[in-house]
Amino acid sequence: MDGFLDDTCGGLTELRVHGVHGTPPQTTLHHPHPWRVAGDGVTGFYRRWWPEGRPAGGDADVPGVRRREAYAWGGLTSGGRALALWLPLLPFSLVNLAYFMLPRPSRGRWLRRLAEAGLRLFALLLTGTLVGAVTRASVDLFGWQCTAPGRACTLGGAPAFARWLAETQAGEPSRRLAVAALAPLLVVALLWWLGRRTWQRDEQTVVPPGGGPHSPIPLARPRLWHGGAPVWRLRVVHVSFAAASVGLAVAGPFAATRAGLALTVANAAVQVAAAALVVLPSIARRLDPHTGATAPAWLTWSCRGLRAAAALTLAATGCAALAGLGPGAGGRQLPGLGAGALQQALVLGLGLILLAAVAALAILDRPRGHDPAERRALGELAVMDQPRGHDPSKGRGLAVEDRPRDHDLVERRALGGLGAWVALMLAAGMANVLALGLLFWTAGYLGEPGAPDSPAPPAVMLFLDDTIWWRAALVPLLALAALAVAAVLWRAGRTERDRLAKRLAHYYGERHAPAVAALWSCAALTDRAGLVLGVLTGVGVAGVTAATALGQFGLIAPVGGLAGALSSAGSWALVAVGVGLVLIGRRAYRDGRLRRTVGILWDVSTFWPRAVHPLGPPCYAERVVPELVARVGRLARTDQDQVIVSGHSQGSVIAAAVVLQLKPELRRRVALLTHGSPLRRLYAAFFPAWFGAEGLAAVRAAVPWHNLYRLSDPIGGPVFRRLDPFAAASHGPVSDDPVDRHCWDPRRPALGEPLPEARRHSDYWLEPSYDVAFDRLVRIKAPA
């Protein structure tokens, strides 16, 4: 190969891990010619290649001495075109986030297991909600209502395929339902295929020997990134439950006949068996990959038996329906819709139970640092995981004076520890928005949506329950609540801007201080994200509860007046949301830039494994963390080698997880440099059991660590202590914190110069502070 490329591994390696948005290697390396030295086109390790030959200068790679390497993992979340299919799966991803937001106190273990079982059951019902929406749109609105004699699909303006089905199977409703059931069955098959394919392609990675299985830090346990068996079991349960719900919709209207009753009972039994399996603690238990432990054989055979029973029952239901099950029960709407209403009631009731359980766990798991005994324990944790004979004063870990101070570790729990419940409610809300949008769009496409109490309904009207119309009426109310919250945030930001402007005037001058203050105050609004989510979730849950009561008891019909106007406006808004998602997904399938933009959503939400919902978007960390652990082991084989892992934004979260997976003897050769890091601002606040005081203290104890942050950055922030930049500007650099380093942004202009452009969350690698922090972390000396 012409040119120059350092392909050695010894010496000092700066291993850069990018953040969100699928940053290309040339940007991460700050070099126009990256060359992949390991990995593949999805995830790869890149180094700088000089086509003109070996360069000179202190920044160039020197074989056997020093080099710069970049790890590119953006192909997992923003590279493939299948990303366009992930948008409807966002509710499933939120349920997995809820599991990792769950408090994990040392007391109340049985309560936590009960909450985890409730989360798995909630995830199963959420699968039923989305698949049930497709089933209702196809089997009820199309197969039962629209193609019935004299209804919308028999008229001249109906689609040709609908008119054909209505004319040829007018007297055989079971055959119409069997044909209509193909659409939800295709959705179930697609969910199964996506879950299986993404696991094999993106997550199935061998975990190298790393942290001990008995580590008290959950993030340090290798089993976290070893989920093949539990994800398979959960996938079997969810797919069987969804398939049985389709079979139940086909067989339920004919329960008056012997065959229809038998098929209805069989499909319901499959759903009950799936629900019984999903609440078992062992169904989702992850085992350490290095101990050789296996799941109980009876559990594996139970899942296989459930899969076989679901397939046989579905096949029998389809064959019997095609053969003809009789006229079925009468009615405008599909008989048996009470099962769907029962499922919605279960979701609401389970949500209330989980609220009580999560609140109790949050009380038991109060923030650390309030009790003196707990503070002493946290101080001891800083040196707990060091190798025997280790001297912390010689450049490794923390010196005694550098250990976390009591007030450094006081945690700020987002939403008072109720983040798991809020994430669940957001997941349920998004699932309902998608479901309602599909129902209203289908009814509008085939005919005209109407309420059961609509006076003198025309033949083209397709009926939806009052509960559905009442939930549609919530959309304008939620929009008003969002506007009110936005107004409050604007007012709070303006107050903070005025306060900052007075303090910044001394550093930036009266001319530039207001602009910088506006920038900093806007970035600080991220800290209020929990409050915003809590308010909107509270309004939404109260509204759904009221809508369910109004719909079930028929107190007020959503026809005419203010109720009719709100429900009509909400139905149009829901259709617009559904169409917008389809258009975004279609464009993302073709446009790589849009895929990278949409991929930011998955960069944040799919870091965590599929712990409770197996059909969500794939977890990239199940592949990224083992690959980085293996690469660090290759680059730092001897005590004369050192790897400085440099993580930006989400890359800092990955880097912290990697550090805790390393062997103790390997950690001596590793240092950590993070910048723009959301570790404390977002992850410790929303995932305290994993990135709380103990988790961050363990990372701090494991390797030397520096963290750069800017107050103009809306995502990154300090990890342990927010330094006072004004004191630093007046009295010199504040150096009493061993980890956090504040970077001024924008740069202070010289007299008469314009204010430089702010970098906010980007280009930390170009900061002068970056080089200073990097040099402080270097342990080995380069040979002359």
Image (spheres, grey):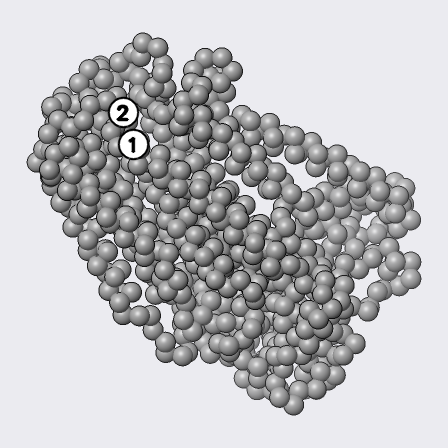
Which amino acid does the dot numbered 1 rest on?
A: Leu
Toward which corner of the image does residue 47 lie, by quadrant? bottom right
The answer to whether residue 540 is above or below residue 11 is: above
The answer to whether residue 290 is above or below residue 752 is: below
Q: Is residue 705 visible?
A: no
The answer to whether residue 611 is above or below residue 379 is: above
Toward which corner of the image does residue 63 lie, by quadrant? bottom right
Which numbered tag is attached to residue 333? Answer: 2
The answer to whether residue 493 is above or below residue 392 is: above
Instruction: For mark 1, give the secondary structure.
Output: loop
Image point 19% across, 40% down: which residue?
A: 264
Q: Residues within 10 Å of mark 1 (few under 14, many from 20)?
A: some
For marks 1 and 2, give the CA distance: 8 Å
What residue occupies the far left of the structure in this picture? 323
The answer to whether mark 1 and mark 2 are in CB contact below 8 A is: yes
Q: Which residue has dot 1 on it?
A: 337
Horizontal side of residue 507 vs 658, given as left or right: right
Image point 80% across, 52% down: which residue?
A: 747
Q: Position of residue 446 (x, y in %)?
A: 29, 22
